[in-house]
């Protein structure tokens, strides 16, 4: 298995697909890496030479922020917003949608499982 940026990339994948297994590299950046290093996209990971893997590894280290560094930056940005006590930070702290979505309904993903309210009993309809 090729190990790039601390991630084991499956052998049977195409190069531009395999690179997307690295956190922070999507389709756009994987295509950019392949074109800049002149590696054909149709090539598979197990067909790469050690020199090619080394070139990919060095290119990613030089040009991209991936895996742990990117995750750390992301969490520090959220922590900074919370410490500033700005609107976005307060939404993060309350675990509510941050980007203006409505919360009266359709916010279950962010808010979590619905909690029953005590004292609310449904009375059957009288006929």
Image (spheres, grey):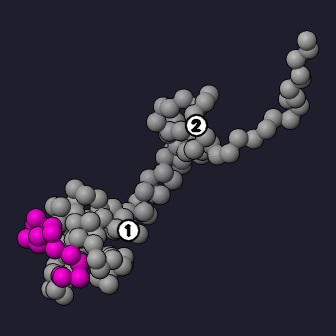
Tell me if residue 99 comes above or below residue 81 in the rendering. above
Q: Earlier in the sequence, mark 2 or mark 1?
A: 1
Whether residue 47 appears in magenta in the rendering, the answer is yes
Which residue is depicted at the point 68% across and 45% down?
113
The quarter of the picture where the N terminus appears is: bottom left
Question: Residue visible at 8% across and 70% down?
Answer: 38
Would you call the spot at circle 1 few (<14 residues within 10 Å), some (14-19), or many (20 or more)?
some
Task: Give the CA separation, mark 2 to mark 1.
Answer: 29 Å
**Residue located at (50% from left, 39% from top):** 98
Q: Badge 2 local density, few (<14 within 10 Å), some, or many (20+)?
A: some
Q: Is residue 101 left or right of residue 121?
A: left
Identified at 91% across, 14% down, the residue is 126
The image quadrant that residue 48 belongs to is bottom left
Residue 52 placement (x, y as % from top left): 15, 81
Residue topped by disc 2: 107
In the picture of the structure, the residue carrying the numbered disc 1 is 67
Pick the quarter of the image with the C terminus.
top right
What is the x, y in percent for residue 37?
10, 71
Q: Is residue 31 left or right of residue 126?
A: left
Q: Is residue 113 left or right of residue 9?
A: right
Judging from the image, what secondary structure is the residue with disc 2 in?
loop
- Residue range in magenta is 34-48
């Amino acid at each position: 298995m090729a190990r790039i940026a601390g991630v084991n990339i499956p052998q049977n994948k195409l190069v531009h697909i395999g690179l997307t297994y690295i956190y922070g590299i999507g389709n756009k950046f994987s295509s950019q890496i392949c074109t800049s290093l002149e590696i054909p996209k149709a090539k598979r990971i197990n067909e790469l030479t050690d020199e090619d893997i080394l070139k990919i590894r060095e290119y990613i280290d030089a040009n991209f922020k991936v895996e742990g560094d990117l995750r750390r930056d992301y969490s520090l940005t959220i922590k900074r917003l919370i410490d500033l006590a700005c609107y976005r930070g307060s939404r993060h702290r309350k675990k509510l949608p941050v980007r203006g979505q409505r919360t009266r309904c359709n916010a279950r993903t962010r808010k979590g499982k619905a909690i029953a309210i005590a004292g609310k009993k449904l009375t059957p309809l009288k006929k």
